[in-house]
């Protein structure tokens, strides 16, 4: 979009936007995102936001709106580009283009990022925006495009995306892992670049798309500076995007109970039964809400952290979950806050010697205990330890980085305690 706008003699106003959409909708695409660019005749100061084969990509912070004829010309050129470069014939891909004079209300974004929004709803939201619409017959892509336009842009993160030379598309990507690790050490604002548990490089996609890698950060400067430090195959162009990644926007309200399919939110309550293992390492468990209602919840093995956290819980522990649902009523957990934990008890402790107070040793099953120091004996009874620390203390637990959603709230890479062997 930026190259097309520049070729037409137009300017980019503000930062281009990459907006991730509801991760629970059944019609989502692989990246489940939309791009937004404001185009006008810029004036005043400008800022470099990328590099194109034609030269630096700049954005202005103020500009004069396009005329109706210019808007129509822009829409036609952009739609030609979309049709030429998108996978519009692939199953589940429904590209769409919206050119509007006024942004839709922010409420459209908040509705669309948390639940399923129908095309009829979107058309009502767009009625006052003077839209030019281009899409494939299904029209589904218009929903995401409209929601992305409505994103208010508050509390953003940024992603600097580097693109490949076209003759390399579909070939193995060359991105040096050590340079990514070094960039993360120098720029603490970077997030979700490498999964140290699985050693997976998260900045590079695994498809045949034109993207070489993308660096996510909490500041734009860190993303740009780090991009220049990554050793890789040649970069044809790059661009900085303002994004809603890492914001947790899709879970910023309670999950509806009774369940509504394809929605996201939070749940708070207490564990009432031990979790039940399922094939593949997944766990299902009921959570009792303060209202007394119970919700079936699931954590999945690829998240790595979450099954271990849930396995460590006992009935009575209070937790807060965030996640969402598919067509069934099961709440799929994306993260866990441990709010309060009941005391744990253990009945495997050897008694202490009544004479010297040293821990006694076992003489074997059913034979009792003996002190190695003063040879005192004790019957075969073990006294309970009144409390031991829980395996996972109170706090927040995220999935391993490679299993997190683009929208998932930011958090440190989990540092798991060692597994207990007794």
Image (spheres, rainbow, N blue to C red):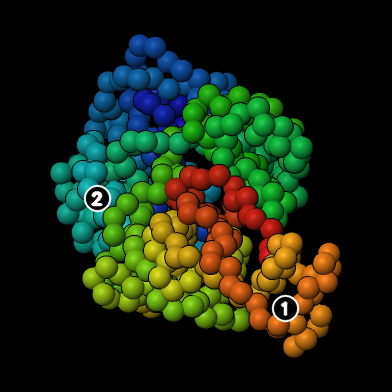
Q: Is 89 displayed left or right of 178 in the figure?
A: left
Against 135, residue 38 (above or below) is above
User: Which residue shows up at 41% across the image and 59% down it?
Assistant: 340
Q: Residue at x 34, y 62 (%)?
A: 268
Along the line of sight, which residue is nearer the eye, 30 or 107?
107
Q: Nearer the viewer, residue 200 or 42?
A: 200
Q: Is residue 314 left or right of residue 304?
A: left
Who's the residue at 75% across and 82% down the image?
A: 368
Q: Is residue 4 left or right of residue 108?
A: right
Q: Residue at the spot x=48%, y=45% of the render?
A: 410
Q: Secondary structure at mark 1?
A: strand
x, y percentage for residue 147? 31, 49
**Nearer to us in this view, 408 or 379:** 379
Q: Is residue 66 above or below residue 318?
A: above
Local packing at callout 1 (Cα closer than 10 Å; few below 14, some 14-19, many 20+) is: many
Q: How many marks?
A: 2
What whole-number distance in Å separates the C-alpha atoms at marks 1 and 2? Answer: 72 Å
Q: Residue under label 1, please give it.
A: 378
Q: Is residue 53 left or right of residue 48?
A: right
On-image quarter of the C terminus? bottom right
Q: How dense is the environment of label 2, judged by Cα within 10 Å: few (below 14), some, or many (20 and up)? A: many
Secondary structure beneath label 2: helix
Please tell me in which quadrant of the rendered image residue 328 appears: bottom left
Image spot of residue 133 (x, y percent): 29, 49
Q: Residue under label 2, please give it.
A: 108
């Amino acid at each position: 979009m930026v190259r097309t706008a520049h070729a037409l003699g137009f300017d980019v106003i503000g930062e281009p936007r990459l907006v991730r959409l509801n991760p629970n909708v059944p019609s989502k695409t692989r990246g489940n995102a939309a791009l937004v660019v404001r185009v006008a005749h810029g004036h005043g100061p400008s800022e470099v936001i990328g590099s194109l084969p034609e030269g630096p990509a700049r954005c202005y912070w103020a500009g004069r709106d396009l005329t109706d004829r210019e808007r129509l010309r822009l829409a036609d050129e952009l739609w030609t580009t979309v049709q030429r470069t998108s996978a519009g014939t692939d199953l589940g891909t429904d590209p769409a283009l919206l050119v509007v004079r006024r942004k839709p209300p922010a409420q459209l974004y908040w509705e669309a990022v948390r639940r399923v929004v129908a095309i009829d709803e979107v058309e009502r939201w767009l009625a006052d925006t003077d839209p030019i619409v281009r899409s494939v017959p299904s029209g589904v892509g218009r929903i995401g495009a409209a929601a992305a336009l409505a994103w208010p842009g508050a509390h953003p993160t940024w992603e600097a995306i580097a693109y490949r030379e076209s003759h390399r598309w579909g070939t193995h990507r060359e991105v040096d892992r050590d340079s990514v690790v070094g960039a993360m050490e120098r720029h603490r604002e970077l997030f979700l670049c490498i999964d140290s548990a699985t050693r997976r490089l998260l900045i590079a996609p695994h498809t045949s798309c034109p993207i070489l890698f993308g660096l996510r950060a909490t500041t734009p400067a860190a993303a740009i500076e780090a991009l220049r430090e990554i050793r890789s195959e040649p970069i044809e162009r790059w661009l900085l995007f303002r994004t809603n990644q890492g914001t947790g926007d899709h879970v910023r309200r309670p999950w509806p109970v009774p369940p509504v399919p394809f929605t996201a939110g939070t749940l708070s309550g207490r564990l009432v039964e031990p979790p039940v293992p399922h094939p593949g390492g997944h766990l299902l468990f009921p959570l009792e809400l303060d209202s007394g209602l119970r919700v079936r919840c699931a954590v999945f093995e690829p998240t790595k952290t979450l099954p271990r956290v849930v396995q460590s819980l006992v009935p009575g522990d209070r937790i807060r979950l965030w996640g969402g649902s598919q067509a069934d009523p099961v709440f799929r957990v994306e993260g866990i806050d441990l709010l309060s934990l009941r005391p744990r008890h253990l009945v495997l402790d050897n008694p202490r010697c009544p004479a010297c107070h040293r821990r006694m040793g076992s003489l074997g099953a059913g034979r009792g205990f003996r002190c190695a120091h003063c040879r005192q004996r004790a019957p075969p009874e073990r006294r309970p330890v009144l409390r031991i620390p829980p395996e996972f203390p109170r706090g927040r637990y995220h999935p391993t980085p490679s299993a997190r959603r683009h929208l998932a709230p930011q958090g440190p890479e989990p540092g798991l305690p060692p597994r207990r062997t007794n």
